[in-house]
Image: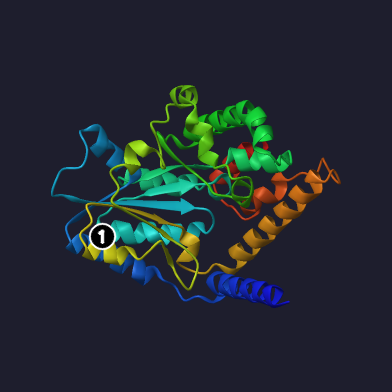
Amino acid sequence: MRKLLQKLGSMAKTVGYRVYSDFLMPSRLATFENLLNQAIECDYEVHSVASFWEVIKAGGPVSGKRYLILRHDVDTDIATAREMWTIEQRLGVRASFYFRLSTIDIPLMRQIHEEGGEASYHYEEIATIGKEKALSTEQQIVRELPLMRHSFAQTLFRLRKLTGLPMHTVASHGDFFNRKLGIANHELLAESKLRKETAVELETYDETMMKYVTSRHSDTLAPAFWKPNDPFEAISRKEAVIYLLTHPRHWRTDPYGNLLDNIKRLWEGVLFAMRKNGKFSMVPGSILSHLSVLTVEGEWANAMVSLVVA
């Protein structure tokens, strides 16, 4: 009974933090701007993943110089992603923004690229196809990898055509499906042939870049906000190469968007369980996987539809 109560208490605490982060938390964008200002004051060069990749190709980081690699995974909340980009513009720094199919915003992506930043693909084919087919073992996933790789390649080609952007670096998205089965989306790019065919020069978790990183940080939900620790401390220590991953969702609440995303994730979990148990093998899982297409406007709405239904 004690263990059950402890588990229920832990679950309640987790739900409480999620509710606070998604619906009640004050904006933390001033903290983000302060972080960048501190890095600039400590003589850090702020890089996108793509621009740091160019540093690596030119021979690697220069001894005595400091580098901050800034990456944003736009899982949800395009509006806050735009605000973060506006802050970066004001401070004269650049970053990488990786967009899921559900957050593709072609005008914003082009603006980011034109101003010296990077906009590319936040891919998740293993999770998407795995959920649609209710795959439940690593062996099942391995059998479907050719289909998943083909889907990734075709989507990347279409995105490049629609945006006109190079997209030579890509970043894998982390989904509940990946955590459940213990296989990351970036396993797709373990095959060198696929990289060559798609002209992908770097995946954001490649050792060719990570070996230079001396301090790695990611944002997370309240109350911790950072994992494994605070990047302000890394800047104060003057770490040589800091790799900072952020998600716009963690910096400003978007109640409507977060509610939709939470419903979508809950629905995906239900569908996965139903398919896995053979209850409903033909449930159209991709409908709610791309809920944001219901709210888009402008020239990229048709592009989103073409990507989702292709």
At which x and y percent is residue 45? 21, 52
Q: Secondary structure at mark 1?
A: helix
Looking at the rendered structure, the kind of residue marked 1 is Leu
Residue at position x 72%, y 41% in the image: 132
Residue at position x 24%, y 62% in the image: 235
Residue, disc 1: 91
The quadrant of the picture occupied by the N terminus is bottom right
At which x and y percent is residue 307? 60, 38
Q: How many marks?
A: 1
On screen, residue 1 above or below 138? below
Q: Is residue 270 visible?
A: yes
On screen, residue 138 above or below 197? below
Residue at position x 47%, y 63% in the image: 220
Q: How is the image coloured?
A: rainbow
Left or right of 43? Residue 116 is right
At which x and y percent is residue 211? 31, 42
Q: Quadrant of residue 114?
A: top left
